[in-house]
Amino acid sequence: MKPPKRLFLGLFLFVSILILSLLLYFGYSIYSPNLAIIRYSFIAIVVLLSSVSFFSLLAFGYMFLSILKGISLPFLNRLAEKSVTFLYPYILQLGRLLHITQDKIQRSFIEVNNKLVESRKMQVAPNELLVLLPHCLQNNNCLYRVTGDPYNCHHCGRCVLDPVLNLLVKRQVNVRIVTGGTIARKAVKMFKPKLILAVACERDLSSGIIDSFPIPVWGLLNHRPHGPCYNTSVSIDALNEILNKILKPEEPLAQSLLCDCASFWCGR
Ligand code: SF4
């Protein structure tokens, strides 16, 4: 079952309104203190809170419309990304106060993020996409080191990397199997992708999405039937479905390249 997007959006709105309330409080307090220094500090706080509150409410409205109507505007995309990056730690804190688990908020955030990425209707060439996979997809007893080079996999079929890598090689996309954020950042620097498709757990995906701004990241959660970070798995159908959405359709071979001579020896 997909996590509800409204959880993250609700918390986002709550934090924005909280900032607005602080703004009103400080705005009101400007008139009470006698000391000029306190008054000026309050004015500075009011100006700061007004900007944060204005932009976060604008970002909320935009994200809401984007998810509902699929609207995408480059300037507002940036604003939504910046606001989410800024408010994300406060949203997690608020969730903790309200006894909402971090996983739940992060799942909701990933859903909201994916919807925003989808609303951009981006389609990239295979070499413009980077697929990042977590190393825990590999069978724990496997002797082959796939983190440096995914092509070291011998396709023995003991873990999900076998069909996953088959699919990714077929789609000719860049792929890296990573052990953490540092290696993932290195891969992003190396491939300079226009779009990232990342498979990971809630925590790694949400921090990866925020770290990678402004490069959009489509996040896909892994399955953890044996607990976290151990022999995890991922849905091949979901992966394929996302690839179909974000990869440009393959162009048919130009007619001029097709040979119509009937020679048996002709290799074309
Ligand atoms: S499929 Fe590849 S990575 Fe998985 S256990 Fe076999 S050789 Fe190792």
Image (cartoon, helix red, strand yellow):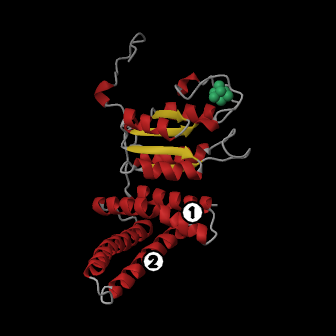
Expressed as whole percent of the image width and height from the top left, the position of residue 123 reads 38, 47
Classify residue 258 by image quadrant. Answer: top left
Expressed as whole percent of the image width and height from the top left, the position of residue 139 reads 68, 32
Expressed as whole percent of the image width and height from the top left, the position of residue 209 reads 46, 51
> In which quadrant will I find the C terminus?
top left
Left or right: where 261 falls relative to 134: left
The label on residue 18 is 2
Residue at 51 percent across and 71 percent down: it is: 11
Decide if ligand 1 comes within 8 Å of the CB at mark 2.
no
Which residue ends up furthest to the front in the rendered image?
35
The Cα–Cα distance between marks 1 and 2, rounded to whole angstroms, is 18 Å
Within 10 Å of the Cα at label 1, are there few (<14), some (14-19), or many (20+) other Cα atoms?
A: many
Can residue 2 be seen by looking at this rendering? no
Expressed as whole percent of the image width and height from the top left, the position of residue 46 reads 31, 77
In the picture shown, does residue 204 fall above or below 257? Answer: below
- The amino acid sitting under disc 2 is Leu
Left or right: where 178 falls relative to 22: right
Classify residue 29 by image quadrant. Answer: bottom left
Residue at 37 percent across and 56 percent down: it is: 120
Which residue ends up furthest to the right in the rendered image?
226
Within 10 Å of the Cα at label 2, are there few (<14), some (14-19), or many (20+) other Cα atoms?
A: few
Q: Quadrant of ligand 1?
A: top right
In the picture shown, does residue 167 fall above or below 67? Answer: above
**Which of the pair 161/36 is nearer the observer?**
36
- The amino acid sitting under disc 1 is Ile
In the picture shown, does residue 135 fall above or below 92? Answer: above
Camera-nearest label, 1 or 2: 2
The label on residue 105 is 1
The earlier-in-sequence mark between 1 and 2 is 2
**Which of the pair 198/47 is nearer the observer?**
47
